[in-house]
Image: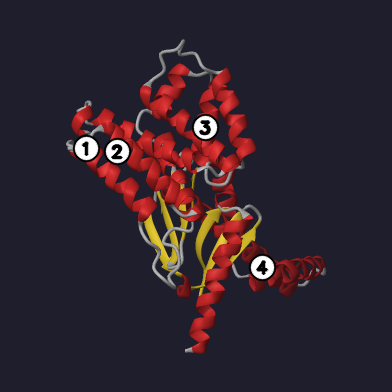
Amino acid sequence: MTCYAEVENAVRECATHATAQAQAEFGLAVTRELLTADGVAAAAAAELTEAGARAVSAAADGAGTASAEQLRVWIGEIDEGDLSDGDMDPDLLRAITALEAWAAYLEERSPERIAALGIALLEQADFEASGAPLDDFLAPPETRQAYERIRAALTEPAMHGSEPRAVWENSITIDAVDKAAVRRAFVAAAVSRRLRIAGAIALPIALVVGIVSAVSGRPVGAFAFGVIAALMLLLVVFGVILRRVATKAIEDGMGVGSRLTVRIDADGLGLDGGFGSSRAPWNSLSSAVRIKGTIVFRNMAGKAAFFVPGRALDDTALALAEKYIKRDRTRTGDE
């Protein structure tokens, strides 16, 4: 049997001897998990002011990219908006405590903060188990699995010459600005750049020629003007249809209020959202570029394969993706 004190000490020991990378990956994962746990959003809406609830949501979205200073701003807004009168929902309290521990870790890089997050995970498992016995804390499967997860994340030895499994991850809640940016990128990708340039040059010239021909009074001039006008009308109709198709596609896969998670690791790009889950190995992609509020990942044929709201990846994450794409293209060339 393992008592609670022994389990807690073991968690502290694991955190102390973990690598900086393992500490950061585990700490961020636990912080996000507790901030997005079932019931946290509802409890925040009921027990915090509107500003406080917004801060909880913002922290859940931005924990992976926000600085310690920004996290402190959100924590301050949550504290100022506390309406619970000392009787806060346990899931919400645990989420806020995790956010404070993560902010402190970013400031201090202290393993004690990671241990605190591990202990918070154990407390959540204890709650789910309806109270584990203190003299045999790992008897319930919930607490045992939580402890095994902590130990694996913080003590798993790094394989020589291998790259980390999880390098970068971020989750956001899609808003109207994200949706509009992705829709514009989708429409732009559907019509080639050459075609847009040719249309922008040729159509005005053709329209002027058609008008001149029409006012000349010759039947052929009127006919030419009619043909040009019909082509322009067809172009407008095509644009409207394309926009509606894009709107439907984006609404189905990336509607306002839906969650999007982006993962970058040594093997590829992972996306999870309303559209399901997608994964692309780096050797299937040719580039990743930021275009007007959207990040576009292109396949080896140079065509757009994935569209991601720009705020889902910061510049560091985008540079990391580009590095992996370039690495695999170099490997392919060597082969």
Nearer to me, 308 or 57: 57
Label 2 SS: helix
Q: Which residue is mark 1?
A: 2
Please tell me whether mark 2 or mark 4 is closer to you in this view. Answer: 2
Q: CA distance from mark 2 to mark 4?
A: 64 Å
In the picture as drawn, the residue positioned furthest to the top comes out as 85
Q: Split into 4 quadrants, where in the image is the N terminus? A: top left
Asked if marks 4 and 1 touch (Cβ < 8 Å), the reply is no
Closer to the N terminus: mark 4 or mark 1?
1
Amino acid type, residue under disc 1 in the picture: Thr
First in sequence: mark 2 vs mark 4 = 2
Marks 3 and 1, how far apart at CA: 29 Å
**Badge 1 vs badge 2, beta-carbon distance below 8 Å:** yes
- Going by the image, does 196 lie left or right of 65? right
Q: Please tell me which residue lies in front, 90 or 147.
A: 147
Left or right, residue 317 beside residue 198: left
- CA gap between label 2 and label 3 equals 23 Å
Residue 262 visible in rendering: yes
- In the picture of the structure, the residue carrying the numbered disc 2 is 7
State which quadrant residue 218 falls in. bottom right
Nearest to viewer (mark 3 / mark 4):
3
Tag 3: Cα neighbours inside 10 Å, few (<14), some, or many (≥20)?
some
Instruction: Give the residue at x 38% y 47%.
Output: 14
Q: Amino acid at mark 3?
A: Glu
Indicate the amino acid at tag 4: Arg
- Circle 4 sits on which residue? 196
Q: Residues within 10 Å of mark 4 (few under 14, many from 20)?
A: few
